[in-house]
Image: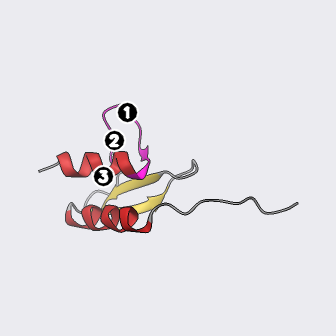
Amino acid sequence: MARQWRSIPNRETLARLRGLAGEHGYTLERGPVRDTWILTSEKTGKPLIGPLGTTAFNVKVAIKILTSMK
């Protein structure tokens, strides 16, 4: 079976997400679905739950959620 080609997310956007996650006290883990990420709290060890009740986000949604946090 041949390997499937998989796109790499924009490295700059992913680096921005990693920076924002660190600033807000979250670690970044790959999600179970392709191109999704889970933000896990460093304090509690629980994943961040989004407005729709999901714990896995694509890069753009995760950045939007983190930038809306104060």
10 Å crowding of disc 2: few (<14), some (14-19), many (20+): some
Under mark 3, the amino acid is Ile
Task: Please tell me which residue is depicted at 53% across the width and 53% down the height of the picture.
Answer: 35
Residues 19 and 60: in front is 60
Q: Which of marks 3 and 1 precedes in the sequence?
A: 1
Point out the stretch of residues depicted in magenta: 48-59
Q: Name the residue under label 3.
A: 63
Residues under numbered marks 2 and 3 in contact, where contact means CB atoms less than 8 Å apart: no
Residue bearing the label numbered 1: 53
| Corner quadrant of residue 54 | top left
Q: Position of residue 30 (x, y in %)?
A: 50, 59
Hey, what amino acid is under mark 1? Gly
Question: Considering depth in this image, is 7 or 62 the residue closer to the camera?
Answer: 7
Q: How many marks?
A: 3
61 vs 67, left or right, is: right
At a point 36% along the width and 68% down the height, the residue shown is: 15
- State the separation of the CA atoms marked 2 and 3: 14 Å
Which residue does the numbered mark 2 point to in the structure image?
49
- Residue 70, horizontal then vertical, whole percent: 11, 51
Picture residue at 33% right of the left edge, 61% below the top: 17
